[in-house]
């Protein structure tokens, strides 16, 4: 259901709320009150009522996250799927991505061929990150890239095996429609990163067809 635009524009008429909206529009993953406040240089008590006002008019969704926290669970805010774009998001990109995915699927590419196309991107990404003097290691580099892409990774270590679950998929709609394309492009990217980075090898990549959330298992050397 579409959001009523009049209360939306009234809510965003406040400079602080508009700044918060911009911050959330650019964020790859949902943000807590504290994270938003820190990014904007405001006190959380200042940010909180503005978030509630935007939630009331349908601009924001909120989820509760209690993973690894002590005390009260955090509220994480993100733009509602029904929120109007207001010209801030590149609406043409999802359309183009869907058209390209439809076109690619017509040729029925082999999953390994699809993954191979993304390996070069993964290698270039890993090489750029590894060039930093403060490179933290293979697993941490892969984790950081997944974070920047918006996968909100959760990492579990068990001896020489590290599992990284993707608790959020920024491409979920396309991945559900074209799992053989999207999930294997993602797999290839991570395999390409592991090819360049010393200390990790992809032993298993679980896609949407295997489990939810998806995850990758890395053997740490």
Image (cartoon, rainbow, N blue to C red):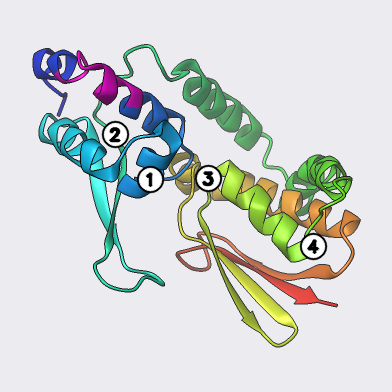
State how far apart marks 4 and 3 are (Cα): 19 Å
State how far apart marks 4 and 2 are (Cα): 35 Å
Residue found 60% across the figure and 44% down from its top: 148
> Quick check: 185 left or right of 149?
right
Chain-order first, disc 2 or disc 1: 1
For disc 4, the marked residue is 138
Decide which of 33, 153 is in the foreground and name it. 33
State how far apart marks 3 and 1 are (Cα): 12 Å
Q: Are marks 3 and 1 in contact (CB under 8 Å)?
A: no
Nearer to us of marks 3 and 1 is 1
The answer to whether residue 47 of the structure is visible from this angle is: yes
Nearer to us of marks 2 and 1 is 1
Q: Are marks 1 and 4 in contact (CB under 8 Å)?
A: no
Res 70 quadrant in image? bottom left
State how far apart marks 3 and 2 are (Cα): 16 Å
For disc 1, the marked residue is 31
Q: Secondary structure at mark 4?
A: helix
State how far apart marks 1 and 4 are (Cα): 26 Å
Where residue 8 sits in the image (x, y, percent)? 16, 19
Q: Are marks 4 and 3 in contact (CB under 8 Å)?
A: no
Chain-order first, disc 1 or disc 4: 1
Marking on residue 81: 2
Nearer to us of marks 4 and 2 is 4
Chain-order first, disc 3 or disc 1: 1
Q: Secondary structure at mark 3?
A: loop
> Quick check: 24 left or right of 122?
left
Residue found 46% across the figure and 29% down from its top: 26
């Amino acid at each position: 259901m579409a959001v009523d635009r009049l209360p939306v524009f009234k809510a965003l008429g406040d400079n602080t709320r508009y700044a918060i909206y911009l911050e959330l529009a650019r964020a790859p993953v949902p943000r807590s009150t504290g994270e938003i406040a820190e990014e904007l240089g405001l006190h959380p008590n200042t940010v909180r009522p503005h978030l509630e006002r935007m939630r009331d008019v349908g601009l924001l969704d909120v989820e509760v996250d209690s993973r690894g926290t002590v005390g009260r669970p955090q509220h994480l805010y993100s733009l509602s799927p029904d929120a109007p774009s207001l010209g801030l998001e590149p609406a043409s990109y999802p359309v183009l991505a869907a058209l390209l995915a439809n076109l690619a699927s017509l040729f029925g590419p082999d999953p390994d061929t699809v993954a191979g196309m993304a390996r070069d991107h993964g290698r270039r990404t890993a090489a750029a990150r590894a060039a930093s003097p403060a490179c933290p290691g293979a697993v941490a580099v892969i984790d950081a890239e997944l974070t920047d892409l918006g996968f909100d990774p959760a990492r579990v270590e068990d001896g020489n095996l590290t599992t990284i679950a993707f608790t959020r998929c920024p491409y979920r709609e396309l991945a559900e429609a074209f799992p053989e394309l999207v999930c294997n492009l993602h797999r290839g990217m991570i395999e390409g990163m592991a090819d360049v980075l010393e200390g990790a090898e992809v032993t298993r990549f679980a896609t949407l067809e295997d489990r939810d959330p998806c995850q990758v298992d890395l053997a740490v050397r």
